[in-house]
Image (cartoon, rainbow, N blue to C red):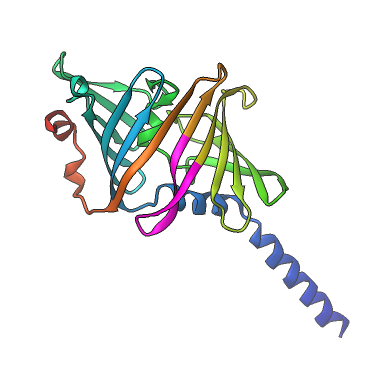
Amino acid sequence: MKTLLAVGVLAFSFHAGAAEDPAEWVKKADNIRNPAESYEMKIKVETSENTSVFQVYLKGQDKTLIVTKEPARDKGRNMLMLDRDFHAYVPNLKRSMRLSLAQKLSGQVANGDISRTRWYGDYSVMKEAESNGEIQLLLKGNKDNLTYAWIRLWLKKGSFEPLRAEYLGLNGKTILKKASFEDYKSIAGAVRPTTLKIEDTNKQISHIRILEMGKKDFSDSFFSVRNMESMK
């Protein structure tokens, strides 16, 4: 009887330990924000500098083509992400340039904020705390050329909906920006945050808003530099 009891306790302990998997929590949060499928989105980026509208085409977590729709003066300034390589086409120069995901797009928004939003696989994840129905995680980048080297992330316990984040510097301590995931709505088959609010240390705020989102299939060849340069 004692042996059976010990086995039962051990099995329960193993099951409880296996349930604590922060990486899986982050994967679930990713699927809420930006599922690993093919989608087309229309987004608006609002900053103190200007307001822009983009048509965004995504396939999986490593292919994104971004076409500028507004303002009219910026049409043709398209962008392409392949894995962690980010390209931008400059019509005046009639050529594309390779940029960093961390480089500023507009206001407080970086290139990677609208092109590569994956956490799972890009970061090692550690649970820091849990309180008031929230889970606090620390994400450390495990690849080069990510938008942010470190992220402190809060998820809603149980549903793993992303609530807010701190984007940290290379030392993992300095707060560069704060973000909050807002305006949860039913869109593209699930309830997702449709607004990302980003605030820098000077209290300057930008918003990325999803206006439309729907599933759509794309071939791999759609995501090419040539296509980026030609789309209007």
Picture quadrant where residue 93 is located: top left
Residue 160: image location, x then y, percent: 56, 53
Residue 199: image location, x then y, percent: 52, 25
Residue nearest the observer in this picture, 46 or 225 = 46
Residue nearest the observer in this picture, 96 or 11 = 96
Q: Is residue 191 left or right of residue 12?
A: left
100 shown above or below 155: above
Number of marks in the rendered image: 0
Residue placed at 13% from the left, 32% from the top? 232
Question: What is the residue that sits farthest to the top in this orientation?
Answer: 93
| First to last magenta residue range | 182-196
- Give the main secondary structure, helix, strand or loop, of the magenta stretch: strand
Picture quadrant where residue 136 is located: top right
Residue 102: image location, x then y, percent: 42, 24
Q: Is residue 111 left or right of residue 159?
A: left
Question: What is the residue that sits farthest to the bottom in this orientation?
Answer: 1
Identify the image quadrant of the N terminus: bottom right
Q: Is residue 90 left or right of residue 123?
A: left
Residue nearest the observer in this picture, 190 or 140 = 190
